[in-house]
Image (spheres, grey):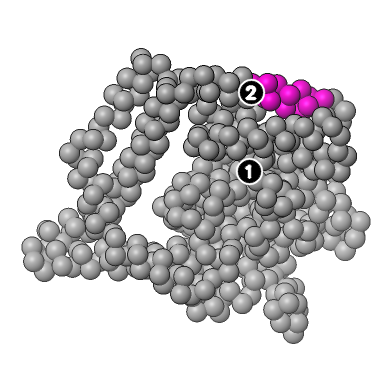
Amino acid sequence: MWLLPSLSLVANAAARIYYRLSLAGERVPSKGSVLLVANHPNSLLDPVLVAAAAHRPVRFLAKAPLFTDIKVGWLVRASGAIPVYRHVDNPDTMKGNVDMFRAVHRELAGGAAIGIFPEGVSHSEPGLATLKTGAARIALGAVAQRHETFPIVPVGLVFRQKDVFRSEALAVVGKPIRWDDMAGRSPEDRDAVRELTHRIDAGMRQVTINLERWEDQPLVDGAEAMWQAERDDNADPARKVSRLETVTSLLAKFRNHPDARSTQLIEDVTTHCRGLGRLGITPGELKADVRLRASVKWGLRRFYLLGAPAVLVGVAGLVLFWLPNWLTGRIATAMRPKADQTSTYRLLVGIALYVLWIGSLATAAWWFGGITTGVAALVLVPVVGVVGRRTREKWRGAWKDTRRFFMLRSRPAQIASLQRRQREIGERLAALYEEVNSEQ
């Protein structure tokens, strides 16, 4: 368990290197017993994001075969994970779960944070899978020993493109689930287990996006983006997830009880988003300020990106790390991971290759330039890699903004028409949302 004390720090660094990570929502209690329950869309990277969001050591439950897996077993053991024995893996080992429950209850009694993925399996479905009862039974069993409840905190993991390096990722910490009224119930009480599992499911759905099918994602994203743009709503990532889940719920309601108004609204949102897509802009960008004064300020703030230091670092980082970056993709692909394991393999392979590469460059620098040069290379090469990557991302963002500026300026009549259309759709979305809320 040598990694456990620094797990959150290491996880935060790894997650931010691989993804453009945002942490949002509530704060996980910094001390005392807590059970973290999270969705499971991305294999071993899910514990990484949960640990990053927790800001404290977390002991995760993990399926027993991972502990002996030649590729990741060392990491699972080092992080202090607790093995769970599943019937699907080996029916003969199920009795080992007695020790699992005992270990978890002991950790919770000692004030530890325990992480569990109640879906029971990593998957690539568009919404939550049916929850297993393990989290509820753990909580009820622990409270029977402690004689007091502790926070059960949902954590929602949301990925834009989970298998793409430097794509967006979000970890949302929800409000603790209410269950004080169940303090006297037993883990053998099936009604209590069922009710607490239902509450955990409801809490997790508040911080996750649960589509009926992946084909709905562009529609849901577009409606939420229009809603935010037209209402100038808070851009906080947790609020965004809440809006996305609301739009998803409305879409499911429309499908179950279709009417002319909802059908027309869905069609209008889809048509508007397709029109913006052809122009290469989003609903928020449609409302961008393209007046000359604002544009000059924008340019001045980014002028440094054209300077020699930024260009030097950006290009140096690309050249220095081209080979390990290329090898990472090739080797990870050759390992034929499942869809929900792609990022895990790429991260683990990348860490190994990059460490070897940086060590090789530092050794070469020491060989040719002495110990001082070698130490300097060991320190500076990773810095150049990280800063160079960030610089190139800013170049891409600046190019996209520049293209959008000229496109918006060159089509004033078309843009004005789209803005009016978007404003009208946004008002209809808001009215419908208020109407549905008032019925509940």
Kind of residue indicated by mark 2: Arg
Question: x and y percent of residue 343 in the render?
Answer: 50, 61
Kind of residue indicated by mark 1: Pro
Q: Is residue 96 above or below residue 22?
A: below
Q: Which residue is mark 1?
A: 218
Instruction: Give the farthest residue toward the bottom.
Output: 92
Q: Would you say residue 231 is visible in this rendering?
A: no
Query: SS for tag 1?
Result: helix
Quarter of the picture holding the C terminus: top right
- Residue 421 is tagged as 2
Badge 1: few (under 14), some or many (20 or more) residues near its Cα, within 10 Å? some
Q: Would you say residue 346 is visible in this rendering?
A: yes
Residue range highlighted in magenta: 423-435
Instruction: Count the numbered circles shown.
Output: 2
Question: x and y percent of residue 111 in the render?
Answer: 63, 53
On screen, residue 62 versus residue 94, left or right, reads left
Query: SS for tag 2?
Result: helix
Q: Is residue 326 magenta?
A: no
Question: x and y percent of residue 81 in the render?
Answer: 58, 66
Separation of residues labelled 2 and 1 (CA atoms): 18 Å
On screen, residue 304 versus residue 417, left or right, reads left
Q: Is residue 271 above or below residue 42?
A: above
Residue 131's quadrant in the figure?
bottom right
Nearer the observer, disc 2 or disc 1? 2
Q: Is residue 60 above or below residue 335?
A: above
On screen, residue 413 versus residue 130, left or right, reads left
Q: Is residue 432 magenta?
A: yes
- Disc on the earlier residue, 2 or 1: 1
Residue placed at 62% from the left, 29% from the top? 226
Q: Nearer the viewer, residue 387 or 101?
A: 387
Question: x and y percent of residue 114 in the render?
Answer: 64, 57
